[in-house]
Amino acid sequence: MVIREDVPVRHNDTVPALFDPPRQSGPVVIGTVLRSSPRFRGVEPFYAEFIAGLEDTLRVTNGSVLVHIADSLDDEIASYRRWAASGHVSAIVVHDLTENDARTSILHDLGLPALVLGDPLHTSKTGVATLEVDNFEAVTLAVHYAVELGHHRIGRVAGPAQLVHTGVRSSSFAQAITANGATAQTVTGDYSEQSGFDGTRELLSGPERPTMILFDNDLMALGGLAYARQAGLAVPAELSLLAWDDSSLCRLSTPPLSVMRRDVHWLGAAAAEMVRELLAGRAPGTIPAPAPQVVARGTTAPPPAG
């Protein structure tokens, strides 16, 4: 589904009733650890909105979120051990899964309940509560949108290769490109704005440069937009750009970025509901997140003639 948007986004602040009201009494504290990028210190817009969804839902029962920014996996696991020893958190939200990810097993051994945010092709193996995020169909939709506009040379600046969802997106991208008779080139970034700048420069340096580029997050798309501006390329007349996930940064850029939008606030709110259900003693469950949508703004258009 493609939406043409000319008005500001209004987020849905409520989550549909997913379960019966939980029986747990007392405030819930959800812990989550964010890994920092060497070129980006702080909280990415995706996680800022996700945490806001967690907090808005937990606040009703005086719950809260405890966030730690880690430099490495060892630092992340050390945080889990401290939280388990201190009793400061009720449960953990795990995200950015990697192949053979050991974090859920470690949390189980520490006695910390866990909720996984991830792709359905992989989360079924974890044996913990899962909020499914289907990246495969989303990428298929993005490529189909690009081809419908007339683009047949499509580039992509991907996220870190070690992440499971990057692999899922890459597999979907390759299949969708082949199915649509297009050609593609992918470079790898680290979710920072600088890596989007560098990746766009690399994609546009070859003789068969793409007419449209997909970015695995909003910060890299902003970097791509900055490079296009520096290189004197008109967006979208000469180059189209499509970002992954919506944020205020996308809506406030010049021109506003077209995006693959998921309701990230909803994801956070749903995760909080699932954690409360888990703590109430119910078996770990799995629910799917709403399907993403292409939101066409000011950075996508048909390719230039010829």
Image (spheres, rainbow, N blue to C red):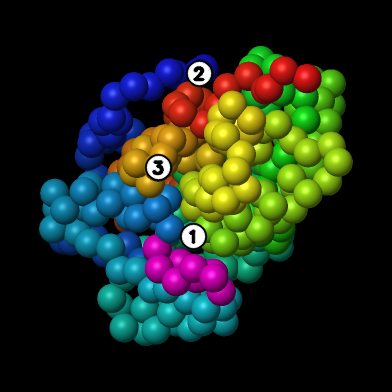
In the picture, the disc for residue 253 is 3
Q: Which residue is drawn at 44% across and 19% down?
A: 3
Residue 217, given in percent of the width and then of the height, sits at 53, 48
Residue of label 2: 2
Indicate the secondary structure of the residue bearing disc 3.
loop
Indicate the secondary structure of the residue bearing disc 2.
strand
Distance, label 2 to label 1, CA atoms, is 30 Å
Q: Is the magenta stretch mostly helix, strand or loop?
A: loop
**Chain part drawn in magenta:** 33-43
Residue 35 in magenta stretch: yes
In the picture, the disc for residue 94 is 1
Q: Which residue is drawn at 36% across and 78% down?
A: 83
Q: Quadrant of the C terminus?
A: top right
Is 50 on the left-hand or right-hand side of 163? left
The three-letter amino acid code for the residue at tag 3 is: Ser
Q: Residues within 10 Å of mark 2 (few under 14, many from 20)?
A: some
Distance, label 3 to label 1, CA atoms, is 31 Å
Residue 253, given in percent of the width and then of the height, sits at 40, 42
| Towards the viewer: 214 or 132 | 214
Q: How crowded is mark 3: few (under 14 residues within 10 Å), some or many (20 or more)?
A: few
Vertical placement of residue 222 versus 80, above or below: above
Vertical placement of residue 213 versus 306, above or below: below
The three-letter amino acid code for the residue at tag 2 is: Val
